[in-house]
Amino acid sequence: ALTLGWGDIGYNVVVDKYGGRWEGRKGTLNSAPGTMVVGGHARPRNTHTMGISVLGDYTQTDWTTGRTLVPSAAVLRAISDVSAWKFAVSGVNPRSTSPLKVPTWSESPINSSLQPGTPLPRISGHRDVSSTACPGSIYNYFGQIRSDTADAYDSFFVEAIEPAPKPSPVPTPTPTPTEPA
């Protein structure tokens, strides 16, 4: 960041292994609804996207167990929550496809499971647009992340339009009959 004069990292939001969420690119959290500070996370597909970086290397194997490192439930929940929040304030349905397309091999050699030239899902990985192993084993959880994001997105709107409970009627006092004097 300092050598290239960026002043911050390219990702809009950073998630730690405990699910903590941090602003990466300055201005991301207070950007106006429907807008996003342009990140530097997946050139040339940074505009109209939000980059979320998870701290750690999920391409490595744990030398003690021989298993590939996997994200915690807290990491997956944080990714879904942050994504749902930004989709909701931007008015973008996470179930829709992006106007951006998976690059063809001539544009960029990619390591994607997606077909080149097809629209990108709203939640996609760095490897879907560039020659990289990023996001490592997190890529295997994208189905769950997309589903959890869509559920969280829906809950924003259910809570917003659900009518408030009606107040209980206040009983009207019944006049007491007066006795003749």
Image (cartoon, rainbow, N blue to C red):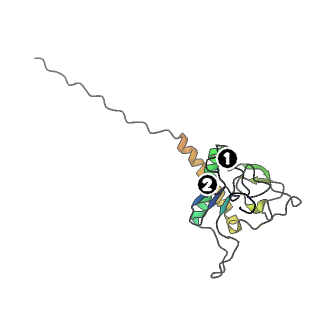
Mark 2 element type: helix
**Residue type pointed to by label 2:** Val
The image position of residue 111, as x and y in percent, is 80, 65
Separation (CA) of disc 1 from disc 2:
14 Å
* Apparent side of residue 158 relative to residue 168 in the rendered image (left or right): right
* Identity of the residue drawn at 79% across and 59% down: 129
Most distant residue in the right direction? 106
Q: Residue at x 89, y 60 (%)?
A: 106
- Count of numbered badges drawn on the protein: 2
Q: Secondary structure at mark 1?
A: loop
Amino acid marked by disc 1: Asn
Q: Quadrant of residue 173?
A: top left
Q: Which label was assigned to residue 93?
A: 1
Displayed quadrant of residue 70:
bottom right
Q: State whether residue 16 is above or below residue 93.
A: below
Question: In terms of depth relative to the viewer, which is nearer, 9 or 7?
Answer: 7
Percent across and percent down for residue 67 are 66, 77
Q: Which quadrant would the C terminus be assigned to in this image?
A: top left
Q: Residues within 10 Å of mark 2 (few under 14, many from 20)?
A: many
- First of labels 1, 2 by sequence position: 2
Task: Pick out the residue farthest to the left.
Answer: 181
Asked if disc 1 and disc 2 are in contact, CB closer than 8 Å, the reply is no
Q: Is residue 173 above or below residue 17?
A: above
- Above or below residue 29? Residue 65 is below
Where is residue 137? Give x, y as percent: 69, 68
Left or right: where does residue 8 sit relative to residue 181? right
Marking on residue 82: 2
Image quadrant holding the N terminus, namely bottom right
Q: Residue at x 67, y 50 (%)?
A: 94
Relative side of 126 to 169, left or right: right
